[in-house]
Image (spheres, rainbow, N blue to C red):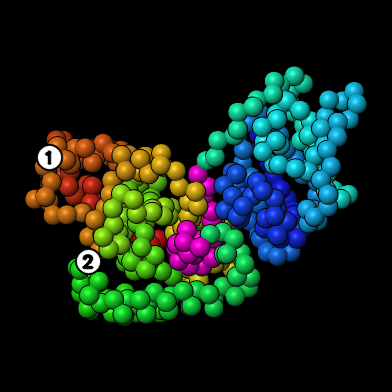
Amino acid sequence: MYMRIREITPFLHASLYHYPRFESFEDIQSCGIHEWGVLSKDTVKQIMLVREKSRISVSESALPILGNECRKHTEPHSGSTRFTTDASELLTSPGEKLELVVSDVEVRVSSEEANVPRNPTPVSLRSTIFSPRKQDSLFWSMYIAKHGVGEFFEIGSKYMNKEIEEKSKIMEFMKTNRPLLKSMKITSDKGQEIMGDLMTNKKTELTVVCAFALFYQVRIWVVSEDSRTYFEFLPHNSDDNTPVYVIHRSKPKRSEPLCSDARNEVEASPPNVDGLRTSALGSYTRFTTVSYTVDTHVLEETLIRIRDDMFRLESPTFHMKGISNYKITDLEKIIKILGITRPPEITKWKKNDMYNTIRLHCMTAWLDR
């Protein structure tokens, strides 16, 4: 079952918050939203994903606030039901034709199969990946993990002010908790460097994430699915009960020029300040810059999969420990996890070959471009 909500006005949170089904904005997004477009107090664009057999479609017209009285009745001879009550009925009734009626706008649900038996089992919630779509996507991913999607959208147009405000709080926390930094083996010079990078860089670097883990008192996992590696940033005195924020790192595909002549010209031209290579024909290609998304509903199975099926790196500066810290069996296990195949120029794996191959794999995966 796929639900596509193309336009909802006004703000979704204000529309649905007062219903018992949704006690908070996080409850709404936990129902299966996996990709968000533009959301403001006037317009919401998003895609909701629910795994069932039925297809749900929503009319193009604007949906007003769900403030009218709910009404429910059965249409004779059609077997359909009209309601505006609990959304769980909508998601667990694939065998019926359902209509959500609000004022003059209807949300229609129809089954592709004529006789699909009613399934009383509730739809299981799945982890939700949210993309903030901001320049500093790493910062906003951690902010959303802490404060929630609802508070992120309530910022309105003052994202820059909120970013400076939040980073200032983290910097003040580090200034007043220097003994805490020393206990985590963060030297005074390193602390100053982190605070400087935090306030001056346009994009948050991985070396700064440890400050967020300290300030929020959570474990932060930054995951690269493609390379099967991840970083773990820990707060002071963390244990298995400490909450975990899961941030996903990805490298989007770059845009290609419009024609082969333009491609040759683009590849030969230097990049401009925005990281673009342009040609006289007006076509361009963008470097593969990294972006970050946040899992706003982290499941235990997600943590187990990351911990068991991926290789945890030591730090953004030194991805691995020294070679003397690994046995050959350890390196063989890491190679298997990462899915690395032996290069053709290496006839037989040696310890140095395995270590250098793993290290190169990790360094390449976490390059900024």
- Is 14 displayed left or right of 164 in the figure? right
Kindly identify the amino acid type of the residue bearing the numbered disc 2: Met
Which residue is depicted at the point 43% across and 79% down? 168
Upstream in the sequence, badge 2 or badge 1?
A: 2
Kindly identify the amino acid type of the residue bearing the numbered disc 1: Ile
The image position of residue 69, as x and y in percent, is: 83, 49
Which residue is depicted at the point 36% across and 63% down? 217
- Is 122 displayed left or right of 352 in the figure? right
* Camera-nearest residue between 246 and 87: 87
* Camera-nearest residue between 61 and 288: 61
Magenta residue check for 141: yes
The image position of residue 143, as x and y in percent, is: 48, 64
- Is 200 displayed left or right of 153 in the figure? left
Direction front: furthest residue:
20
Q: What mark, if any, has residue 328 been given in the picture?
A: 1
Instruction: Residue 234: tell me if it is visible.
Output: yes
